[in-house]
Image (tube, rainbow, N blue to C red):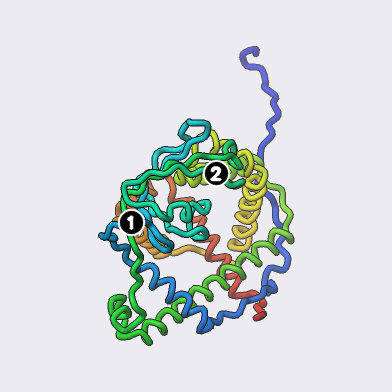
Amino acid sequence: MAKGANLTFKARVEVRPEINLQSYKGIAVKKKKSEITDDEAEATLKQLQGMYAQYQPITEARALQKGDFAVCDVEVFIDGKPITKKHEKMMIEVSKDASLLGMGEDLAGMKAGEEKAIRKELPADYPDKKFAGTMADFKVNVKEIKEKKIPALDDEFAKDLGANDLATLRGNLKAKLLERKDADAVTDMKNQILEKLLKAYAIHVPPSMARRQLDILMKHLEEDLMSRGIPKDSVEAKKKEFEPKLKEDAVNKVRIYFILDTIADKENIKLKESDVDERIQKIADTYKQDAKTVRQYYETNDLIDGLLEQIREEKTLEWLLANADIRTE
């Protein structure tokens, strides 16, 4: 280029999509009835009873029988090669229906200290796809036999859980179940609003934003799969399997961001400093951290702006629900 000469260039840039807001007040949504039956409350009480069961060692020298629990070391092989690390002290119920691949019933008659080889077909939905539907050899070593002792449903059980008596515990459970159903109903109505907004505003999404959002969703999927002990090569296969769906989700998330942001501007929905403080405290409570430490982490990693956007979106969605046409089913 000659010194002092003019430079002419063309640039292609992404721009914020323009949204011509139409009717967004009075969106029709259906609200599910929040009712708790006595049967539902009783089933939850039974689950709670099971959670507080104790597994007591059986001291007598007898064989495993139905309903017992075997504490085992388990190894899995295919063609003589291990496909997972050794699982130590795995609790297996001696039951076909309540155990892994129905393996429990194969343990009946075994005693502590005995070892057994069990051949089972891995399920079609086995996390590591290359082994799905394959016959595998399980080497099970019984270390200990335990029996499940379920506490009685009485006033003493209720007192252990902080209630005055069993009747009070039942009432508390019913109230919590109703609270949960109410929260689920609210979430369902918000999802209905989001679906209708997506249908009403088919806006173009800047590709770079969709790509960034896809990267975030793929990263979350990877972290979730890795946390469940799925091998790296299987994780990559899963990511490819879910990528088309996550691409669609990423585009919709960006579309919703612009739609809600435009509505928030129109309705002058603003944040207060207390909104951020409350959210930081909530995060701190969830992870049992000091609020000051959590804030410092968000500030150091430039996450505050993202947190502000999230809170504003939630407030806008709450505003839309407050102004919706709610009809109880």
Q: In this view of the protein, which residue sits in the foreground, 9 or 223?
A: 223
Q: Nearer the viewer, mark 2 or mark 1?
A: 1
Sequence-first disc among 2 and 1: 2
Local SS, label 2? loop
Residue identified by numbered label 2: 127
125 shown above or below 28: above
Residue 172 placement, left or right of 319: left
The quadrant in which residue 27 appears is bottom right
Rendered-image quadrant of the C terminus = bottom right
Q: Is residue 15 visible?
A: no
Instruction: Please state which amino acid type lies under the numbered disc 1.
Output: Ile
Look at 28% across and 76% down and name the residue there.
160
- The answer to whether residue 188 of the structure is visible from this angle is yes
- In percent of the image, x 55 and y 60: which residue is there? 313
Q: Which mark is residue 269?
A: none
Q: Relative to residue 26, is residue 81 drawn left or right?
A: left
Return the x and y of residue 107 as percentages of the image width and height: 43, 52
Q: Position of residue 170 (x, y in %)?
A: 41, 83
Q: Quadrant of residue 173?
A: bottom left
Residue drawn at 53 percent across, 76 percent down: 182
- Name the residue that disc number 1 marks: 145
